[in-house]
Image: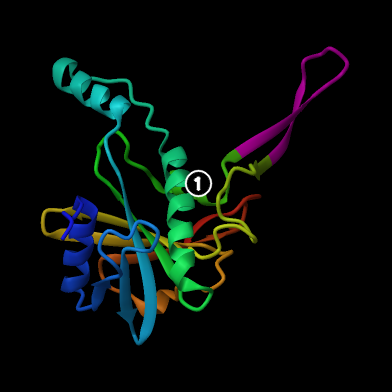
Amino acid sequence: MSQRTASEQLFQRVFDSLGIQWRRVAEGAAQTPDYCIEIGGTVVFAEVKQLDENAADKQAREDMLRHGSAAIFPQSDKRIREKINRANSQLKRLTNEQYPGILVLYSNTFAGDYDVQDLHDAMFGSETHRFAVAHDGSGKMMYLGAALAGDGKMKVDRNTSTSAILSLRSSGDRFTLTFYHNKYAKLAFVADWLRGESIQHFASLLQAGRTIPGWVAI
């Protein structure tokens, strides 16, 4: 039996505590999802990924310990994009557009941690702001509004086997599960399948007063 990663150990402990049945899909099978779970009679496949410390994170941690401060540029959205690409190909092998698939994401490093904006940028595109510059040499600029760049990994024809990204967090014996739903998924992970005090669900929606979508609790 291969050694469990920190994220896999936490995944198993959390789902045990929720009373949700899970099973490993195949030991050492790198091309398939890690887990199959059953929620309310629905089969869901889950691929567990963790953000580990890289060389830049390690240097930042050492600088923090030695000097009390550090320059940190985690590029978390880039890391998440890489995880999405790898996880979706694994999920696609078994979901086969018949079962929902979730990417379970866990940060195993303080410097490479991510926030909700990183997740939205990685999934649906980075927030950009457009300006027009006057051609009369005055230097005046006109704000044209905000838009999402094309660097998002979730599209109508791409990475559609990933129904949601599940952000897994823990502190001591406490945990939180936060689902960020993919609006382009072939099959949705229904929020009402899993509710609880430590569980939240968000969808990317357009809110009043905004020109681009953002996370809204559902």
Q: Main secondary structure of the magenta part?
A: strand
Q: Is residue 218 visible?
A: no
Q: Nearer the viewer, residue 207 or 58?
A: 58
Q: Nearer the viewer, residue 147 or 93?
A: 93
Which residue is outermost to the right? 136
Residue 21 position within the rendered picture, expressed as x and y whole percent measured from the top left: 24, 78
Left or right: 38 with respect to 143? left
Which residue is outermost to the top? 137
Q: Nearer the viewer, residue 189 or 1?
A: 1
The amino acid type, in three-letter code, at marker 1 is Ala
Residue 84 position within the rendered picture, expressed as x and y whole percent measured from the top left: 46, 52
Question: To which quarter of the image does residue 11 belong?
Answer: bottom left
Q: Is residue 190 visible?
A: yes
Which residue in the protein does label 1 denote? 122
Q: Residue at x 37, y 32 (%)?
A: 74
Residue 200 position within the rendered picture, expressed as x and y whole percent measured from the top left: 35, 65
Question: To which quarter of the image does residue 60 belong?
Answer: top left
Q: Residue at x 59, y 64 (%)?
A: 184
Q: What kind of element bears circle 1?
A: helix
Left or right: 121 with respect to 52? right
How dense is the environment of label 1, judged by Cα within 10 Å: few (below 14), some, or many (20 and up)? many
Q: Which residues are magenta?
A: 128-145
Q: Residue at x 55, y 67 (%)?
A: 185
Please determine whether, in this image, residue 69 is positioned above or below residue 30.
above
Quadrant the C terminus occupies: bottom left
Q: Nearer the viewer, residue 159 or 136?
A: 159
Quadrant the N terminus occupies: bottom left
Left or right: 216 with respect to 50? right
